[in-house]
Image (cartoon, rainbow, N blue to C red):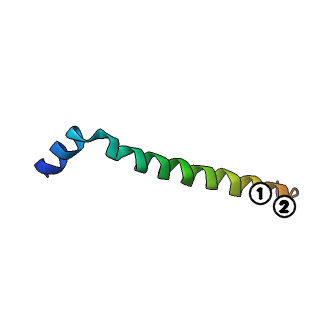
Amino acid sequence: ASQNIRSISEHPWLFIPAFFVIIAVLAFSFVGDGLRDAADPYSR
């Protein structure tokens, strides 16, 4: 565990791919919600 913390502190750019994955998941979620609302306007 200690080596992992040292690796992250020495290489902070390793967070960049994880950040983009999180952004992509949120974007797909919002797009899916929008499509559902557009396809079924009477749902509520």
Could you say which disc has been placed on residue 2 in the image? none
Q: Quadrant of residue 32?
A: bottom right
The residue that appears at 15% across and 43% down in the rendered structure is 6
Report helix, strand or loop for mark 1. helix
In the image: residue 15, left or right of residue 33: left
Residue with the mark numbered 2: 39
Distance from disc 2 to disc 1, alpha carbons, whole Å, reads 6 Å
Looking at the picture, how far across and down is residue 29, in whole percent? Answer: 62, 55
In the image: residue 8, left or right of residue 20: left
In the rendered view, would you say 26 is above or below 10? Answer: below
Q: Residue furthest right?
A: 42
Query: Which is more toward the observer, 43 or 7?
Result: 7
Query: Which is more toward the observer, 18 or 30?
Result: 18
Residue type for callout 1 = Leu
Asked if the residue under mark 1 is in contact with the one under mark 2, i.e. CB atoms within 8 Å, the reply is yes
Could you say which disc has been placed on residue 35 in the image? 1
Q: Quadrant of residue 12?
A: top left
Report helix, strand or loop for mark 2. helix
In the image: residue 41, left or right of residue 32: right
Looking at the picture, how far across and down is residue 42, in whole percent? Answer: 88, 58
Q: Residues within 10 Å of mark 1 (few under 14, many from 20)?
A: few
The residue that appears at 21% across and 38% down in the rendered structure is 9
Looking at the picture, how far across and down is residue 43, in whole percent? Answer: 82, 59
Looking at the picture, how far across and down is residue 28, in whole percent? Answer: 63, 55
The residue that appears at 12% across and 49% down in the rendered structure is 3
